[in-house]
Image: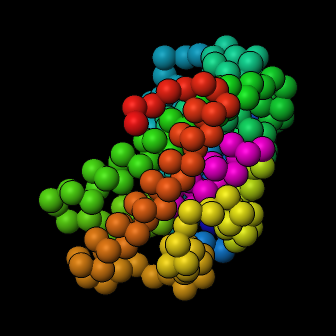
Amino acid sequence: MSRESLKKLSEKIVSTFGTNNIVCVLLHGSLLFNPHLIPQDVDLIIILKKKSSGDCLKLRELVIDLRMFELPIHLHLIYLEEIPTNADYFSIHTCGSFFVCHLRQAETLFGKNIFDVVNGPSDYHLQLSLLQKVQQYTFQLRNLIFKIEPISEKEIRQTRKRTIVVLKDLLMSQGSLIQEESEIFSQAAKYLYDFSPKELEFLQELLTEWTVPSSSKDTLNFLQQCLAIHEQVYSLMRQQVSENKKCRFFS
């Protein structure tokens, strides 16, 4: 999506809800941080001051009108009164309190980024929310592999993306938030001491020469390789949480 298209999108949102009611419109996600990749959607956060029963219907109509854009629009509507002053109590979908750190890096299309004045998160909630996200991604990938129905290209691309994301989450748990994929791998490599040369080579291919598998057999092999990465990262993060936060696991 071009900058001109993003400007039109932001102007449409502002005209729909009014300048006095919008705190900010934020762009985040791969379109912003990894524009060289094929994006799946446009990720937007809309913060409103006042709540109205018709807000969701307005957004629905807006999304229908915005079919002129080449990518699906992924919107999150949040009201100012719902944003805690401490990030420990904030989450969106699979993303817990750590996501406030991401949103501070978002591009502000309108207004001022409200997350700049949100405190935290504390290290405990940061680690817990990152662990739970990696946990969910790992469990979902296992479910995808034994799915009987055909696996879509969208699911394959999402798996590829999440395999890089879990590395980003591992880095964030160590205190570094990195958005560019190539830098994520180079920085994460020092923590991947249990990864085999084959697994490291697979990760490098994801960042450089990767293409969507062409057969069911290749798809399942690809998913299995991604799962191995997920599980390795999940194991590292469980160990880290167990050592630092005294969390116990059955073993």
- Residue 21 found in image quarter: top right
- Residue 240 found in image quarter: top right
Q: Is residue 109 left or right of residue 75?
A: right
Residue 36 located within the stretch drawn in magenta: no
Q: Nearer the viewer, residue 230 or 44?
A: 230
Q: Which residues are magenta?
A: 162-175
Number of numbered discs:
0
Residue at left offset 75%, top offset 34%: 24
Residue at left offset 56%, top offset 63%: 194
Q: In which quadrant will I find the C terminus?
A: top left
In the rendering, at what x and y percent does residue 70 appear? 52, 66
Residue at left offset 80%, top offset 35%: 113
- Whether residue 184 is visible: no
Q: Against 75, is 147 above or below?
A: below
In the rendering, at what x and y percent does residue 184 appear? 70, 63
In the rendering, at what x and y percent does residue 23 appear? 76, 28
Residue 174 located within the stretch drawn in magenta: yes
- Residue 206 found in image quarter: bottom right
Colour setup of the view:
rainbow
In the rendering, at what x and y percent does residue 9 appear? 64, 51
Q: In which quadrant will I find the N terminus?
A: bottom right
Q: Against 31, is 206 above or below?
A: below
Q: Against 168, is 54 above or below?
A: above
Q: Against 184, is 210 above or below?
A: below
